[in-house]
């Protein structure tokens, strides 16, 4: 489970300042903000725009174009299951359905208690040990129902996957 | 006595299969036994069904054990792991495993063998010989050496790399750039990832040679957020190269400057398209640019830019080291050299197989790959990623070659082959292709943006059995529009998986098999 800082204008300004010298700094800044806060809160948009001499619309456009960037906090645990062809060939779709049932959350959604975010991801490059997933930043290959069960149990017990 | 050297891979595949837990357990058990051993975290050899594969250096060579679970470690040590002792998991001398022995590893020569972050290892295995030779022969001769090699873009488009370099070198500019396209988004591919994680200096050397050859002083590697480990390894390698004077000002006293930086994408497949990638690097939405102007004339920040696939750039060191003609002597027809073919999906022996062009698809899937992992019959393979065609078993005689694939309305793409067994429903896969295109379309051109959504809807009707014949005709018409009217390969090539699925497996669409006689 990733731990993020609470939003603070000062901290955001600091993160922006650390990256603004880069060529094409928008993406590195958005990544850094998301790494710090877990998502890119709306008040960050005008700050980035001002720092890089861009319009708010341009920054908003970039923020919303890329699937990775979040505008709201994710669940405590984020499970990204590969939905691409190689994982489908190994039963990835059925496993994703199972995970939805087991976690009680739909694909692309966060559970109402804020515990789990379940999302599709398109290819982790683990296509010779499919199906695969990225569980709280940790790569998992040869995924099966037992691993999903273990995840669900760990999360319910307030632990990280693999810490059982 | 010299302490034994043990290798436990640290690349994404091995780690995803538990290599870190194995390494910890091994360290723990060695400590408990009071044994000192040197544990090197190498990259994978690319024999992924064996991961985690532990190797031990012996007098006869490196002996392997795999796939190892943490619970196997004690019994391995008991069986004499440190001396290459016998054990049910022992696979013998790794270099003698037929899967590896049958390969021609030029680009991937060091992968799995060395410590990825050891410059000493890298140089001991031929590293930086290419750059030194490039410095001796000078920029224009370096470009000509790459032209001579016949190397073509390994991202899939197959454009001659040397010609691209010539164009950039000749373009007047204040600043030229080298951009490495490491946005390896195709399902079934992991060659770029494996280079970054198992032999990162090879990419750094290739980009440095490119920089010297065309007069570029800055480079970017645009990789993916889905490859978190690659990013970390590359950043460390860049730092080490800088410290050793292999990046930065006046490289190795040559008077040439070149430095590079890692950049991370954010989950947009379309950014693997070169102009969308450049837009993204500039900090914008990943919208495809109309060509011309070509990136070679107006690329990153409107400056002349070499943008090459990672595998192309990582192949440059060996070309410079051994000569363009050495490389050109491998392969067939206009496909020269070797290709890292990635066997993936429902396959028994999945992994990376680098070989000269010309090997048949059937040999790859059945002889080398061992057929399906499920043990069921192979029904189809998708070659070349989400935009590549589905090929039936009847086309398994097709040689792996840019032109031979094109002649079958297929593409080799980045070299990925995803195997499906007989449980796959090709109508569903065709629907997925359209859905994926709709999900990933940058939205700039109408055929892709709207066509993909309409395509998915039409396929839903076909699958539901609604006016099947009319809807299939509509689908073909729509595919024509997307093919001919899209700005880039995303919209332009999505018809390949859709139409190949329909042509080769009409029964999955509920159509009568006799309908599309145009299949062959």
Image: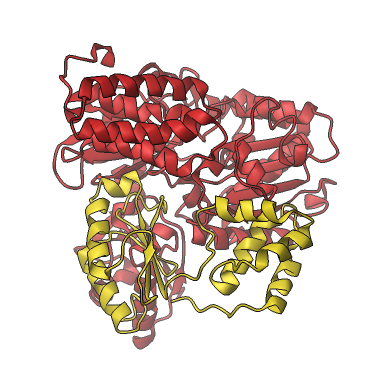
Residue B51 appears anywhere in the view = yes
Task: Tell whether B315 sits left or right of B284.
Answer: left
Residue B429 in which image quadrant: top left
Foreground pick, B2 / B414: B414
Residue projecting furthest to the front: B467
Per the rendering, the colour in which chain A appears is yellow
Q: Position of residue B513 (x, y in %)?
A: 16, 19
Residue B146 versus residue B247 in the image, above or below: above
Left or right of B180, for residue B493:
left
Image side of residue A42 versus residue A137, left or right: right
Q: Quadrant of residue A10?
A: bottom right
Image position, residue B495 (x, y; %): 39, 27
Q: How many marks?
A: 0
* Quarter of the image with the C terminus of chain B in it: top left
Tell me where residue A45 appears, x and y as whole percent: 67, 63
Tell me: residue B350, above or below residue B63: above
Q: Residue at x 49, y 20 (%)?
A: B484
Farthest-out residue, top: B517
Picture residue at 59% right of the left edge, 68% below the top: A41
Q: How is the image coloured?
A: by chain
Residue B124 visible (yes or no): no
- Quadrant in the picture for the N terminus of chain B: bottom left
- Viewer-side residue, B199 vs B445: B445
Q: Nearer the viewer, residue B120 or B205?
A: B205
Q: Residue B33: x percent and y percent?
A: 34, 86
For chain B, the rendered hue is red
* Towards the viewer: B64 or B430: B430
């Amino acid at each position: 489970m990733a731990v993020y800082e609470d939003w603070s204008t000062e901290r955001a300004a600091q993160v922006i300042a650390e990256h603004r010298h880069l060529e094409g700094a928008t993406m590195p800044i958005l990544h850094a903000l998301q790494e710090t806060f877990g998502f890119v809160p709306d008040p960050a948009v005008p700050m980035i725009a001002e720092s890089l001499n861009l319009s708010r619309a341009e920054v908003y456009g970039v923020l919303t174009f890329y699937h990775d960037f979040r505008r709201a906090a994710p669940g405590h645990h984020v499970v990204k299951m590969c939905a691409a062809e190689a994982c489908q060939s190994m039963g990835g779709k059925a496993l994703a359905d199972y995970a939805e049932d087991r976690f009680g959350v739909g694909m692309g959604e966060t559970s109402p208690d804020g515990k789990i975010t379940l999302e599709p991801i398109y290819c982790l490059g683990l296509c010779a040990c499919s199906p695969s997933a990225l569980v709280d930043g940790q790569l998992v290959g040869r995924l099966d129902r037992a691993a999903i069960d273990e995840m669900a149990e760990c999360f319910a017990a307030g632990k990280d996957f693999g810490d059982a | 006595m010299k302490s034994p050297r043990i290798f436990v891979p640290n690349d994404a595949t091995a780690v995803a299969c538990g290599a870190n837990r194995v390494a910890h357990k091994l360290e723990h058990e060695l400590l408990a036994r009071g044994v000192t051993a040197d544990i090197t975290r190498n990259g994978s050899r690319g024999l992924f069904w064996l991961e985690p594969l532990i190797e031990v250096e012996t007098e006869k060579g490196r002996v392997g054990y795999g796939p190892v679970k943490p619970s196997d470690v004690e019994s391995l040590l008991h069986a004499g792991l440190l001396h290459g002792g016998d054990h049910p998991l022992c696979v013998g001398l790794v270099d003698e495993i037929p899967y590896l022995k049958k390969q021609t590893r030029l680009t991937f020569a060091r992968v799995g063998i060395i410590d990825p972050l050891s410059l000493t290892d890298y140089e001991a295995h031929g590293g930086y010989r290419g750059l030194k030779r490039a410095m001796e022969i000078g920029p224009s001769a370096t470009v000509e050496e790459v032209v001579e090699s016949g190397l073509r873009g390994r991202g899939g488009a197959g454009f001659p790399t040397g010609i691209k370099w010539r164009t950039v070198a000749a373009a007047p500019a204040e600043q030229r750039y080298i951009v490495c396209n490491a946005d390896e988004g195709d399902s079934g591919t992991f060659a770029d990832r494996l280079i970054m994680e198992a032999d990162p200096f090879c990419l750094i050397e290739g980009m440095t040679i490119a920089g010297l050859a065309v007069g570029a002083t800055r480079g970017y590697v645009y990789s993916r957020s889905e490859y978190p480990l690659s990013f970390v390894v590359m950043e460390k390698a860049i730092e080490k190269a800088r410290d050793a004077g292999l990046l930065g000002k006046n490289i190795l006293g040559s008077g040439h400057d070149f430095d590079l930086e890692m950049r991370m994408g954010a989950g947009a497949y379309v950014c693997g398209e070169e102009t969308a990638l450049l837009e993204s690097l500039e900090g914008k939405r990943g919208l495809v640019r109309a060509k011309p102007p070509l990136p070679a004339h107006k690329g990153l920040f409107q400056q002349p830019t070499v943008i090459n696939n990672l595998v192309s750039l990582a192949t440059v060191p060996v070309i410079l080291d051994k000569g363009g003609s050495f490389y050109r002597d491998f392969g067939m027809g206009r496909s020269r050299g070797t290709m890292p073919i990635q066997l993936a999906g429902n396959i028994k022996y999945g992994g990376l197989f680098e070989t000269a062009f010309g090997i048949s698809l059937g040999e790859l899937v059945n002889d080398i790959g061992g057929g399906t992992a499920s043990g069921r019959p192979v029904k189809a393979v998708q070659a070349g990623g989400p935009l590549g065609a589905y090929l039936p078993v009847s086309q398994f005689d097709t040689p792996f070659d840019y032109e031979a694939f094109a002649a079958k309305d297929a593409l080799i793409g980045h070299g990925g082959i995803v195997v499906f067994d007989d449980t796959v429903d090709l109508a569903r896969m065709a629907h997925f292709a359209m859905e994926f295109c709709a999900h990933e379309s940058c939205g700039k051109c109408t055929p892709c943006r709207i066509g993909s959504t309409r395509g998915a809807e039409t396929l839903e009707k076909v699958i539901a059995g609604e006016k099947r014949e009319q809807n299939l005709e509509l689908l073909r018409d729509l595919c024509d529009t997307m093919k001919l009217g899209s700005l880039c390969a995303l919209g332009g090539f999505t018809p390949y998986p859709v139409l190949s699925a329909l042509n080769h497996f009409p029964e999955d669409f509920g159509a009568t098999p006799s309908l599309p006689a145009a299949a062959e």
